[in-house]
Image (spheres, helix red, strand yellow):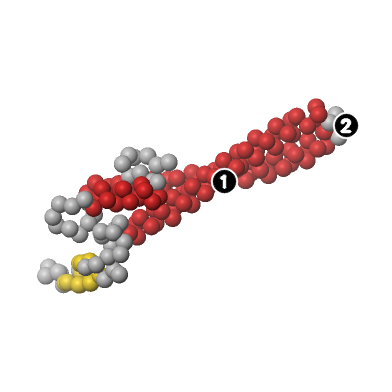
Amino acid sequence: MTSTVLRKEESTLGGSSQFAQCKTSERLDQAFPSVRIAPLFYEFLGRYNDWRQAKLQVMIGSILVLCLGLFALIMPWFLPKVGVWISLVIFILFFFALRYYIVVNERASHLYINVYVLHHHLIGKLEVGFCDHHEPCHCVEDFRGYVLKNYKISFESGSIR
């Protein structure tokens, strides 16, 4: 179980600024040696999952738009008598699918920007070091390995997939 002791100390300069010093005695989750990085990582993970779902919706929308567009163009050749009317109905569906695709694509682009900024922020924290240890440790490598193994997200390069 995680037992975190928070000790608030007042600064001798102004008397109004306070800071919390976290000391962790025993922890269940060995992936987060610092309590400061866990909320940032979980925020990143939530946005990352939203972005992945939005990417899937964009792919489904693009396939739907492509198929409806092709059916609207090809249908009059296969059914010469009623194909024009069916083609008009399919074209109306194509219009709605195209609107859906544009909305989902904008959302996915917006989420990608959010995920990229959070990813960059986490990489910066990892480069600086984020643990509460004062002696040399392997917390950063352990955290990167944990995230790569469990979530298949790499913090080694500047790009995300």
Q: Tell me the element at label 1.
A: helix
* Residue 26 at x, y percent in the picture: 24, 67
Q: Is residue 83 visible?
A: yes
Quadrant of residue 14 within the rendered picture: bottom left
Q: Which residue occupies the foreground of this view, 150 or 122? A: 150
Residue at x 61%, y 42% (from the top left corner)? 61
In the image, residue 1 above or below residue 113: below
In the rendered structure, the answer to whether residue 81 lies left or right of residue 127 reads right
Residue at x 65%, y 35% (from the top left corner)? 66
Q: Which of marks 1 and 2 is nearer the N terminus?
A: 1
| Image quadrant occupied by the N terminus | bottom left
Residue extending farthest right: 81
- Residue type at numbered disc 1: Gln
- Alpha-carbon neighbours of circle 2 within 10 Å: few (<14), some, or many (≥20)? few
For residue 104, the mark is: none
Q: Which residue occupies the foreground of this view, 118 or 31? A: 31
* Residue 75 at x, y percent in the picture: 78, 32
- Residue type at numbered disc 2: Lys
| Image quadrant occupied by the C terminus | top left
For residue 81, the mark is: 2
For residue 57, the mark is: 1
In the image, residue 26 above or below residue 53: below
Q: Can residue 125 be seen in this view?
A: no
Residue at x 52%, y 49% (from the top left corner)? 53
* Residue 90 at x, y percent in the picture: 75, 39
Q: Which residue occupies the foreground of this view, 119 or 26? A: 26
Q: Tell me the element at label 2.
A: loop
- Alpha-carbon neighbours of circle 1 within 10 Å: few (<14), some, or many (≥20)? some
* Residue 84 at x, y percent in the picture: 82, 33
In the rendered structure, the answer to whether residue 82 lies left or right of residue 134 reads right
Residue at x 38%, y 51% (from the top left corner)? 150
In the rendered structure, the answer to whether residue 9 lies left or right of residue 71 reads left
